[in-house]
Structures are given as structure tokens and as C-alpha cells.
């Protein structure tokens, strides 16, 4: 599994008018090729009357799945530029559709490449580009007297508290980068003189935005 990767936060769209043609860039995060195709079909259905609905997507931890389609535009002037923007941004698990309503002015091959690339970029940035990191869930069982100290240790180390359960003992669930798991468990063990009960849970991907964790 990748420790970190770049993708988009969620759905995004933006519209550009280029020489009277209307270009609408749509972007969506997807985990599978089936989900990408479903999104493409939803845009095609929405814009059934458009001149073109061109698209590209890149999926997989090693970008195994890459596809693009010009939808009737001259070969290589639409789908490929959209895919190149995705690659240039270094994004994974993303599908982009650019819808065009022809405005009566021919753009030429170079103009089309620029227009579709710009529209793809606009859609992606409207969606919001984020870095997702693989985090390890660490459950910490402690007596109530250790709670304040453990909260401070987690936050001062730059990690996150997912939630706290108040039972016979306190159970603090922390989220830390997978590569920091060993050093973090040693930190907590030392801070509590070995009195903390530490167990590892699932690993999850999450993003940090404005200092907050976004799953």
C-alpha cells in the first residue's frame, strides 16, 4: 500500500468560455474503473445535447488503469490532454470529463489541446487537490489519571485523537502515520511507565485540511 498519494477531495466542476465554445470540466474521485465509467455516463446523460463529452481517468496505486477518449474531436486533442493534466498533477483514482458546446469558432488542434487541458485543470482544482496519507489506528487503554498527559503527548507529536471512550478505563484511539507507529507506541509506553495497554487497529487513508483530519 502507498504511504501517501495525491487525489481530489470530492466532486468538482467549473466552466470556461473559450472563443465562444463552452467547456465544462467535471472531476470526481473514484476507486474503480466501474465507478469511473458510471460517472462518465452520468455526465453524458446530463449533457446528451453537447457537441462532445471527452474524458480521461487514472486509477490504481501504480496508475495501472489509464484511459482517455476524444468523443469525436480530432485524435489526441481532447482525451489525451485531459489525461496529461491528471498525470502532471500526480493524481490517482480520478476521473475527469470535459463537456463542450461548440460556439461556432474553430480552435484548431493546438487550441483544442489547450482548451481541454485548461478545462480539466479547472475541474480538478474546483474539486480540491489533497494528499491522502496511510494512518495507523492505535488504541490506548489507560487509567483516568493518565488521560491529560496522553492527550498532550499525542497532540504535541503532531498526531490525531480519533475518539475517546470513557469506560472502566479510558480508551483513547489515536491516528498516526504508519511509518511512525513503532516510535509512537514507545513514546506512549515511556510516558505511562509501561502502564498503557496498546493495541493496533485498522489502517486508513485520510487527508489533513486546515489542521483537521478528513477521511
Image (cartoon, rainbow, N blue to C red):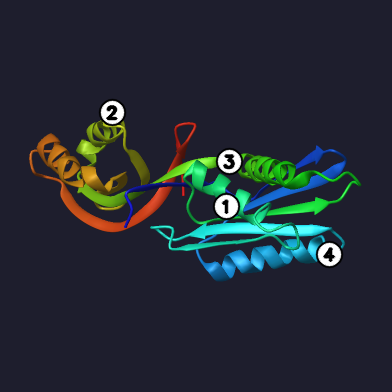
User: Answer yes or no: do the residues labelled 3 and 2 have beta carbons within 8 Å?
Assistant: no
Secondary structure category for the residue under label 3: loop
Classify residue 139 as left or right of residue 165. left
Camera-side mark, 1 or 4: 1
The residue positioned 66% from the left and 58% from the top of the image is: 55
Q: Which mark is residue 83?
A: 1
Q: Mark 2 sits on what residue?
A: 156
CA gap, disc 1 and disc 2: 41 Å
Q: Quadrant of the N terminus?
A: bottom left
Classify residue 55 as left or right of residue 111. left
User: Answer yes or no: do the residues labelled 3 and 4 have beta carbons within 8 Å?
Assistant: no
The residue positioned 39% from the left and 58% from the top of the image is: 61
Bin the neighbour count of mark 1 within 10 Å (Cα to Cα): few under 14, some 14-19, many 20 and up.
many
Which circle's residue, 1 or 4, is located before the other in the chain? 4
Camera-side mark, 2 or 4: 4
Which circle's residue, 1 or 2, is located before the other in the chain? 1
CA gap, disc 1 and disc 3: 17 Å
Amino acid at each position: 500500500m502507498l504511504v501517501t498519494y495525491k487525489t481530489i477531495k470530492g466532486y468538482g466542476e467549473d466552466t470556461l468560455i473559450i472563443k465562444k465554445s463552452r467547456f465544462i470540466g467535471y472531476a470526481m474521485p473514484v476507486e474503480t474503473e466501474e465507478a469511473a465509467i458510471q460517472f462518465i455516463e452520468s455526465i453524458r446523460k446530463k449533457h446528451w445535447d453537447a457537441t462532445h463529452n471527452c474524458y480521461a481517468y487514472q486509477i490504481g496505486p501504480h496508475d495501472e488503469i489509464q484511459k482517455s477518449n476524444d468523443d469525436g474531436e480530432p485524435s489526441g486533442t481532447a482525451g489525451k490532454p485531459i489525461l496529461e493534466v491528471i498525470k502532471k498533477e500526480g493524481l490517482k483514482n480520478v476521473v475527469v470529463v470535459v463537456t463542450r458546446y461548440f460556439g461556432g469558432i474553430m480552435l484548431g488542434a493546438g487550441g483544442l489541446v489547450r482548451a481541454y487541458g485548461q478545462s480539466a485543470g479547472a475541474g480538478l482544482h474546483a474539486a480540491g487537490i489533497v494528499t491522502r496519507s496511510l494512518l495507523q489506528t492505535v488504541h490506548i487503554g489507560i487509567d483516568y489519571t493518565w488521560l491529560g498527559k496522553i492527550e498532550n503527548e499525542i497532540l504535541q507529536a503532531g498526531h490525531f485523537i480519533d475518539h475517546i471512550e470513557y469506560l472502566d478505563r479510558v480508551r483513547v484511539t489515536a491516528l498516526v502515520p504508519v511509518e511512525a507507529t513503532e516510535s509512537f507506541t514507545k513514546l506512549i509506553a515511556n510516558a505511562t511507565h509501561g502502564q498503557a495497554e496498546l493495541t493496533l487497529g485498522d489502517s486508513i487513508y485520510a487527508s489533513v485540511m486546515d489542521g483537521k483530519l478528513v477521511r
